[in-house]
Amino acid sequence: MKGAEEVSDLILEDVRKEFGSFVAVQGANLTFEAGKLTALLGPSGCGKTTLLRMIAGLEGPTKGRILLNGQDIAPLPAEKRKFGMVFQSFALFPHLNVARNVSYSLRIAGVDAATRRARAQELLDLVQLGDKGQNRVGELSGGQRQRVAIARALAQEPEIFLLDEPMSALDAKLRNDMQMELRLLQQRLGITTIVVTHDQREAMTMADRIVVMSHGRVEQVGTPQEIYHRPANAFVASFIGNANLLQGLSTERGVRLGDTEFAVADHGGFGAGRAVTLFCRPEAVRLSDSVPAANGLPGTVTFVRDEGVAREVHLDTPAGHVTAEIPGSFHETVRIGDRVHVEFPADTLHLLPAIESKAA
Ligand SMILES: Nc1ncnc2c1ncn2[C@@H]1O[C@H](COP(=O)(O)OP(=O)(O)OP(=O)(O)O)[C@@H](O)[C@H]1O
């Protein structure tokens, strides 16, 4: 297998894709680090598959450069790029047995039969299907088929490994297992990998870095922790997990929501008197019977979702709707209609740009 040290970062410079008058990807500037797994994450239609297909060479960019090892590969057709690809459907050949599926591309490349057999066995061992080489594809489970698709994509020692929604055909339990398996395999091989997904948990589980997209635009690039704890804007904050996003006015030291001023750890350099969004994760919100020393609001419970390990409490406050996530407890109860004090600890608060009004 090729190691990360032999392949450069993959760099996209101002890559844009238009379909007629529709802009599917707006000038994307991205660096995919060699040897790392990057997730392209966003809602349906945001352009992530189009971006992956341009990287694969299945779609030509309208504009921009795709640089690998110092060369602009944008004009190269897919077959001239040494990339392995796994599709949503796995696209296996039903008439070939498992080993032949894996070695198919080697056969096309004219590799001799003995080498092909040895390589297929090596790859099937790698994905823990060493004893299934002679089986028909139809005899395999969904997870096993996915492993065959991965082994097949790795057969030609690709420089870059591309996966488009690789888990979407699997049920929830298997998806969790395969996410871990794929991540461990990728780390073991140290192969530059790009995974398209609309599932934020999948991206958080597997990726070194996440590229969040919306409407053909890159909204933020960062580690899973950066994206979760320091989202760049309200879209990223609410796409990745749950978020409280309260509209207010910035002050010298924080933010004013209605009559109450809150101290804020990360002021975001907004200055005073600007329309801003206060961002706080539900698990950072505290609920108590007594008035907190600072950053508190009165609240009335409007809904309680008990998820065993945690409890999601929805509240009406003078600043708007707030969601708190508190530890699940067998003994304590929270009921609809309870009046509580809601505290937003200053060190968990961040200011983001104001949410644009649709009417504006
Ligand atoms: N060949 C094409 N011709 C015209 N429009 C296209 C073409 N391919 C994609 N699009 C449009 O470009 C936009 C982005 O599509 P893309 O498949 O990249 O989104 P996506 O984020 O991967 O969504 P999904 O998860 O639903 O596949 C969509 O509005 C889609 O309809």
Image: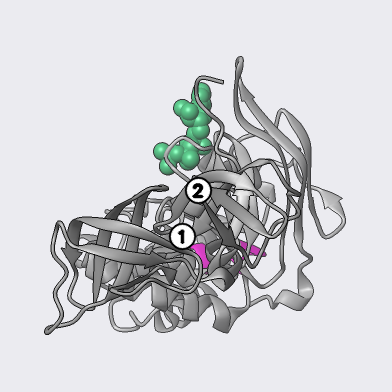
Indicate yes or no whether the magenta region holds residue 63. no
Neighbourhood count class around disc 2 (C-alpha, 10 Å): few under 14, some 14–19, many 20 upward: few
Residue at screen point 76% across, 54% down: 269
Q: Secondary structure at mark 2?
A: loop
Q: Is residue 39 visible?
A: no
User: Which part of the image, by quadrant, shows the C terminus?
Assistant: top right
Q: Nearer the viewer, residue 351 or 13?
A: 351
Q: Quadrant of residue 57?
A: top right
Q: Is residue 3 left or right of residue 153?
A: right
Q: Is residue 23 left or right of residue 132?
A: right
Q: Quadrant of residue 284?
A: bottom left
The numbered dot on residue 259 is 2
Which amino acid type corresponds to the residue marked 1 in the rendered image? Tyr
Q: Is residue 260 above or below residue 273?
A: below
Q: Magenta residues? A: 153-160
Task: State which tag comes first along the sequence, 2 or 1.
Answer: 1
Residue at screen point 33% across, 53% down: 93
Q: Is residue 32 left or right of residue 332?
A: right
Q: Is residue 53 above or below residue 336?
A: above
Q: Name the residue beneath numbered marker 1.
A: 104
* Spatial CA span between label 2 and label 1: 68 Å
Q: Quadrant of residue 47?
A: top right
The numbered dot on residue 326 is none
